[in-house]
Amino acid sequence: MNRDAETKIALGQTALGIELGSTRIKSVLIDDRHNILATGSFQWENRLENGLWTYHLEDAAAGLQESYASLAADVWKRYGRKLETVGAIGISGMMHGYLALDRDQKPLAPFLTWRNTNTARAAGLLTEQLQFNIPLRWSIAHLYENILNGEAHVKRLDYLCTLSSYLHLLLSGQRVIGICEASGMFPIDPCRHDFDSVMLDRFDALIADKGYSWRIRSVLPRVLTAGEAAGLLTPEGARLLDPSGTLRPGIPMAPPEGDAGTGMVATNSVAIGTGNVSAGTSIFAMVVLDKPLRKLYRDIDMVTTPGGHPVAMVHCNNGTSEIDAWFRLFRDFAAAIGAQTDDGALYRALFQQSLRGDGDCGGVIAYNYLSGEPITGSETGCPMLLRGQTACLTLANFMRAQIYSVFASLAIGMDILKEENVRISRLTAHGGLFKTPGVAQRYLSAAMEAPITVLQSAGEGGPYGMAILAAYMRQRKPGQLLEDYLQAEIFTGQSGSTIAASPEEIDGFRQFLRQYRRLLPSQNAAASIINR
């Protein structure tokens, strides 16, 4: 048994990060040296109800408890101690979306996730009025869409938040939000590190004729940057997180963040010129800028790092879910013929098989669109597999096309940053997609036409990043910037692997992407018919 770790757990020399991702609610406990001590997780899935993607909030609360209980059990198993306290806690979750509460903190409408693309009218009008790109999934786009639709619940709005800031409210009683998460709700003024006051006034003027009792400032959370105190775990919050009553209240809490920000932290990508790619149910790339982009782009989101630096973000709604669906089919086939294999081995086998495929996937084209994809103009989901008469359909080409499809929309969006001559000194990737060494990482390098680094902690991703943010709040030196803390305290000397695709691999992906673009009208046409 690790006595040093046991002592740190007993003394609360730890930090806890919990992230509500698209398919897992994962908890990570780290010590004061940022080593992972224990983990816990809970599986959950989004629901398509009345044509909209949602999660039930009671499932979020129950999943939070189950994930924490799983972590506490891991602590007991490894160290023989009950988890009675931690040094700091941070909650993160899927960015964006719509969560509207009344004055009693009760939901006024179903929680809408980032995956919904029903806000095109509102997002377009807001972009024109504010002269700032408002993506379809941002909280303000959802709010304005509800206003335009005359939804009655908007009159009773008291608090507009995201999933992470909602759970932070339940745990601490504080209506606050981390700046990176906030930048997915409403535009941020990078100089003031707060919501843009001019745009707030413009929004109020836009809805003045509605006669609402609230103003937009009053219903948004207070914005905090990384390192600022965000309240304490209340007795009610402690009971919510740990119904057993073992966890003590009074624990400092970090500002709640989104999974984009925690992914940046987990990959040491918060300094100017660095970037990261996060691959999960959605996929996005974030590049920290040294200056604003020259003009407004509808396919580039302007957000921030958790420390407040401006960031250009290319976000695609569809990531690895279609690969997961095909994996389940192959697993069922293996079971049907009596083959014994565990999930990890099957994933590795399928991914490694793709390396035998042709550079252009032999003419096999895959679309992973379980939901709409704004970057390519696809309004609704419709996964597809297409091939011509002379295409070479093999398992290797099929799997290579499926993995390519995760990166295709992202590559289209990233072309804009190339036009802006944005300089990227380092591009790091994380997420479970990269757990099989040298496969997805190689294909991403071909898609980005740049070397890709995957760190040892890549599989832990967001919850590890949130735990680091909690530790930063507790341990940073006066005036120490987040990027300096990460470099000095965590990532110096950390091992990882860097892969640069060959010219032939880059050319193969380019051929795939040309055909992918040409066939997009077919995908859109099929989606419009099948989803009627």
Image (tube, rainbow, N blue to C red):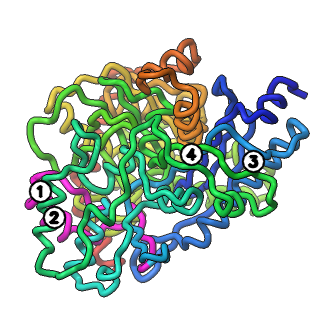
At label 4, the amino acid type is: Met
Q: Which quarter of the rendering shows the N terminus?
A: top right
SS category of the residue bearing label 4:
loop
Residue on which disc 4 sits: 253
* Sequence-first disc among 2 and 4: 2
How crowded is the residue under tag 2: few (<14 C-alpha within 10 Å), some, or many (20+)? some
The residue beneath circle 2 is: 203
| SS for dot 2 | helix
Amino acid of disc 2:
Phe
What kind of element bears circle 1?
Answer: helix
Rendering coords of residue 512 (x, y %): 32, 42
**Mark with earlier residue (2, 3):** 3
Between circles 2 and 3, the one closer to the viewer is 2
134 in the magenta segment: yes
Q: Quadrant of residue 32?
A: top right
Please provide the residue range marked out in magenta: 108-137
Sequence-wise, the earlier of marks 1 and 3 is 3
- Tell me the CA gap for discs 3 and 4: 18 Å
Give the mark toward the camera: 1 or 4.
4
Along the horizontal axis of the image, is 342 left or right of 510? right
Label 1 belongs to which residue?
130
Q: Which residue is painted at 68% across and 46% down in the image?
A: 346
Residue 193: numbered disc: none
Q: Nearer the viewer, residue 334 or 316?
A: 316
Residue 256 vs 439, above or below: the answer is below
Q: Which mark is residue 71?
A: 3
- The answer to whether mark 2 and mark 1 are in CB contact below 8 A is yes
